[in-house]
Image (cartoon, rainbow, N blue to C red):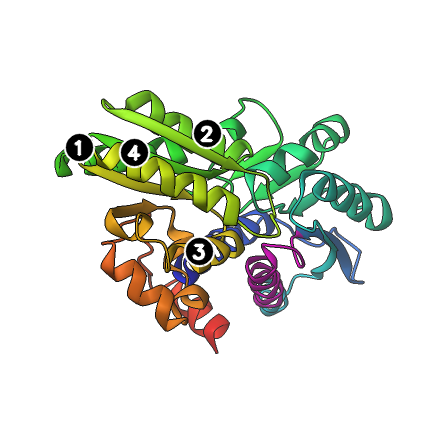
Amino acid sequence: MKRSLRLLALTLVLALLLAACQPVQAPAGESGPQTYILGVAQPFTGPLGSFGTDFGKGIELAVSEMNAQLSAAGSNVQFQIASADTEGTPDGAAKAVQTVVQTSGAQVVVGPLTTSEILGAKQFADDNGIVIVAPASSGVAGAIADDNIFRLMNPPDTFGGKAFLQIMAERGYENVVILQVDDVFGNGLAGLIEEGFDGEVSIVKYAPDPADLSGEASNASAEVARLAANGPTAFFCVCFLGDAQKLLQQATVDANLGSVDWLGVENLRNEELLADASFAEFLGKVNFTSVSASSRSTPNTQPFIDAFVA
């Protein structure tokens, strides 16, 4: 996820929290502070650690600004954060949300981050009436009606899948090789491509948080060579940031993977990844293309963005 989209998601979280706070007034005769606990469950460690850390800092800034606005308005309501680390896994997310709720009494939790994490925590949230504000879940599997999950990432992967399919059709690809993380996010997006693509689709999966991707990269390379012999072929990567870095370590020295156009999720446009000159050069050579939502700022969101960047 690009930093700009992380900021967009954070401003949406801020807007939601502020909207929830605006009607709150101190009860008659009560002058002491009223403190409400906001739970935070993010992947502060693991393969998504950089994203979770950024979201955590953004949430802290949002709460600080929200408390300042409440004080300026004369309200005695303030918010505090209780946080826990999901470690980027469904089981870790379930434990993190449960820990935050049971130790702090929080009834609203910002996070977890990914669709897999959200689904891991969903049962506990639904059973206990806990509201989860999901700032980055876009996977098709997370779109469940009448649950307690509020997903702020827009648009969902159904729109991203359509955009990728349109690009593939316009460029005349007859084949596509997909390397994807084997979780609900990867399976959902790869499934949309497989269902909507007119040509041949070959899928190579890898388990979440792999030690390396040498075997999977080799398998994808062989599939690219096989399909490219029969017509225009593209390589499509559905990978998280750390996984993309491991893939590119292999791809930059692989003739087959470097011979076709690449498409993929926006993690491959991440500033951390592009800071490696060899990765940036390779992605330029393979005409890497991604799609993302607009992240336009407004007079209301820009001050928050400026404060976060600073």
Q: Pointer 4: what residue?
A: 226
Q: Report if residue 90 lies within the magenta region.
A: no
**Judging from the image, what secondary structure is the residue with disc 1 in?**
loop
- Give how far across and how far down residue 32 sits, in percent: 81, 63
Task: Classify the position of the N terminus by image quarter.
Answer: bottom left
Q: Is residue 155 visible?
A: no
- Residue 117 image-quadrant placement: top right
Q: CA distance from mark 1 to mark 2?
A: 26 Å
- Specify which label sits upstream in the sequence, 3 or 1: 1
User: For the magenta stretch, what is the residue range?
Assistant: 42-65
Circle nearer the viewer, 4 or 2? 4
Q: CA distance from mark 3 to mark 2?
A: 25 Å
Q: Pointer 3: what residue?
A: 250
Q: Nearer the viewer, residue 47 or 309?
A: 47
- Residue 132 image-quadrant placement: top right
Q: Pointer 1: what residue?
A: 231
